[in-house]
Image: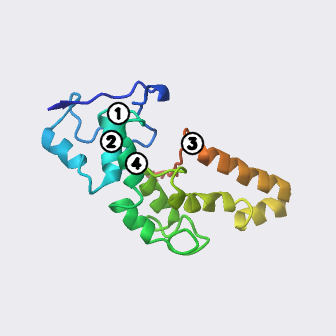
Amino acid sequence: MVPVRRGSGDPADGRSVGPLGLFRGVGVRRGMVDDVVLSWLLEEEQPGVRYRTLTELLGRAPSDPEVRKAKQRIPTVGWAADLLNERAPWGGWEAEGKLYTPKYAATTWKMLALADLGLDWSCPTFRRSIELWADRFTQSSLADQLLGSGIAGPADLRSFAAAWRRWAASPDGWFAVLHGEVLCTV
């Protein structure tokens, strides 16, 4: 068994678990991971899984050479590479302009999977897909609604898009699609 160090929650310690931690609680029992499971999670064929295992289960710092190597390989090998290769020329998946639907197959869902595998703004290959969300502020029905209702003007929309890009480029920026359902009996 291999001891698992969890982060303190302080990003400066290089061991904190992100808000969408891929492995939070998976295979972890009383702070230990079976050697067979750990070996499987560290296989080089899936650098995204390897990266998350090194950083979130083993507490390795982003500057660790193994962590850096795994992070660099994420867009070129394994599941992340497969997803990136499925993108359309416009930078997303499925129907252009529809980032959320069809559910679980559209751009938003693929981006969440890629983020779970460790891709972010620092990856030029992934950056165009991230830019699609900034573009929604200036080139979408959302932009039309904001302009038409008088809530925002063209300068405001450009400012929103610029703020989105700054946020996405921040190492502390993260993305979530919150979804909820109300179940009731009448």
Mark 1 belongs to which amino acid? Arg
Figure coloring: rainbow
Which mark is on residue 66?
2
Mark 2 or 1: in front is: 2
Image point 29% across, 34% down: which residue? Answer: 58
Residue 61, given in percent of the width and then of the height, sits at: 39, 33
Q: Which residue is mark 3?
A: 173
Mark 4 or mark 2, earlier in chain: 2
Q: Which residue is mark 1?
A: 60
At mark 3, the secondary structure is loop
Mark 4 belongs to which amino acid? Lys
Mark 3 or mark 2, earlier in chain: 2
Label 3, label 1: how far apart the Cα atoms are: 20 Å
Mark 3 or 2: in front is: 2
Q: Nearer the viewer, residue 152 or 174?
A: 174
Residue 166 lies left or right of residue 117; in this view the side is: right
